[in-house]
Image (tube, helix red, strand yellow):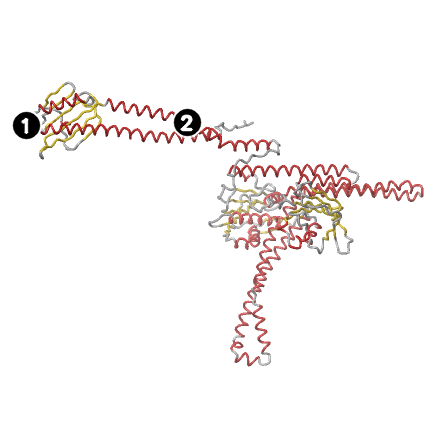
Amino acid sequence: MSATVRPKRSLGITQRTALLSWLVTIVTLLIFVVMIIPFQRRIFLENLESKARSVAASLRNIAAGAAINEDYSSVVDHAKEMLQGDTSLAYLVVTKNDGFSLINDRDGWRAETNLPAQWRPRRREATSGIDYIPLFKQRVFHYSQPFDYSGIQWGWIHIGISLDSYDRSMATVYRRTIILAVCCIALSLLASVVYARRLVRPLLDLRAVVQRVTQGDLTARAALHSDDELGQLAASVNSMTESLQRRDRILQSVRVTAERLFTSDDWRDTIPEVLAQLGTAANICRARVFENLPAEPQGLAGIQRFEWLAPDPRNALRSSPEQRLSWRGAGLDRLASLLESGEVFAAARHELSATEQAAVDPAVQSFLAVPILVRDTWWGVLEFDVCTANRMWSDAERDSFRAAAHMLGTAMERQHVRESLLEAKATLELRVQERTRELQEQITAKEQAMAKLGEAQQSLIDLSRSAGMAEVATGVLHNVGNVLNSVNVSASLLGEHFGNSCLRDLLRVAALLQEHTADAADFIAHDPRGRNLPDLLIQLAEHLATEHRDWAGELQRIVKNIEHIKEIVAMQQNYARIAGIIERVAPADLFEDTVHINERFLARHGVTLERDYPSLPLITVDKHKVLQILINLVRNAQHAVTARPTGNRRVLLRLAQPAPGRVQFIVTDNGVGIPPDNLTRIFTLGFTTRRGGHGFGLHTGALAARELGGSLTVHSDGHDRGATFTLELPEAPA
């Protein structure tokens, strides 16, 4: 048994945000410190150098006279005065080029003749810097300046300044900088923590709301503190929660509706409460029940039997008892056709035509109409009206209200059967007293009533069975829709061909000949227009022949697609395990039939189709079931490559034989690819990542492949890396 892997514990978003802000502040402070300390050090050195230059200038003036008279006593006296007057001076040295040097320091003065060469540099330019001087055995700021007099390079002047003041100043700078840095780091840490908490608090509040929702509390709402991205996220979460809460209320109301209808003796007594439950849960303005009156002279019409109005001040709708609606001829023909076929009709006011808007209450902004079927006959309509906004009805709401209408129709059927039973029971004793023959008739009537009750119960069973077959029906409609798209393209092309046909030119030629019937020979021989008629007729004949071939080709495609639709419908009719038509076909022919159906779509979107058909043996399969799968795979590949904004759009159709007795149909595209998380869900019913998709094609394709004894698999390296679908089938059914 594998142990559960727990995620590594990490810092929370508040701590990480505060830490990041603090690190940014510390880095900024370090940059400041690294820049300011060398700057201060350079200022202190410039001050020492400025002082050394002043001392050198003063000593230079005295040394000039001594150089003329060669009397150095004045230099020694002046140097002694300067050393006594400025305690920061460590030494004063005057060196001649011949090596003779006067050395003055705190201990006195002396003359030297063999100082090292560093006291007489080769490059005659002023230099300065902190250095250790072995002659004086101390670390000083040493300044050297060449001494030239009357154009003669006489020697050098060396000044040594003590570093005590410099070291104290630098220590003060270091100490103050460290104190300032510590204070800034502490303050920045506090500011970062406060800022992070204020920044992350909306996220933490939103997380708490989501946790409450996941625990079942659908009343939880996120507070909207601002209109930025976090505020928009909170609004989206609130909208999602409201949708979940509304759907939960509707499902609860449908459950209550079922309980009330199936426990009540008369559905008419329960319908006001049912309408109130459904209307309140759906947050609508009005709920009504219409009953059809087929005997109306104007045709099929409906009369309002029950009505519920929301007790909302914003509700602009008013009660309209016994309102009549003409389903035919009053602008509601489209609505009547859908309802009569058992379909749900939902629309906003702006989606209706002008005649339909005129037939609808002006205060209604959107409405949902669900047919009520009793014994498979359209009995009436369950209608829901919204007057406050253009409501978009979700699939869950449609299915829930359809279920409520079905329960209402079932309750009517059940009550009709019960009333028939009660009527038979009431007259049974009277007929027994009259004649024995009538007793037999009553027994027969009772048996018939029981049979009707069984039919009513069977209808409930059939409803469950229909729900199970809905998946198959959805897959069939998806496959039919794929083929109908190809039929629609071919029909559109035929329409364009007819609109641009040369028949109009032929009619003009015929009209011209009719004008000159009496002098046709002369007209053709001498009139310029007549002389051009034979060439024109030849060109028209060639154009008409070309058009005829194009039309014949498109009609042949339409006929072939319609035959495929007939086969799909036939397969649905034989769904109860009745096998389809088994044929021996070439795998390449199956791919080519698929290409013919989709080639208009591929060409329209600039998709390059590549083929790789090695020679393979014939296979024995249900041809049209395989075509359904391949058509859906090629159509999905076309959608995948056209979803790319730019780039080469390619689809590769390839055949392979992975093992003896097995054949693979491989469809590869260079489209948007499939993320790894979606690979495990790609064949699930209802799962789709394409806008406008339904999630039926791949699911029904995988089921069909399994019925054929094969499999349908997918591979993708990820987003924008394309995808490969592989349909593997046996050469012959087992």
Q: Position of residue 277 (x, y in %)?
A: 70, 38
Left or right: 280, with 434 as reference point = left
Q: Which kind of residue does numbered mark 1 sit on?
A: Asn
Instruction: Judge whether residue 376 can be spotted in this image.
Output: no
* Residue 591 x %, y %: 56, 51
- Residue 326 spot, x, y in % from top left: 73, 53
Residue closest to the eye, 51 or 373? 51
The quadrant of the image that shows the C terminus is top right
Residue 103 visible here: yes
In the rendered image, which quarter contains the N terminus? top right
Task: Tell us which disc is closer to us: 1 or 2.
Answer: 1
- Residue nearest the observer in this picture, 334 or 81: 81
Say which label, 1 or 2, has the lower sequence index: 1
Which residue is identified by label 1?
69
Q: Could you say where residue 264 lies in the image, as x and y percent from the top left? A: 78, 38
Q: Amino acid at mark 2?
A: Leu
> SS for tag 1?
helix
From the image, tell me which residue sits under label 2: 187
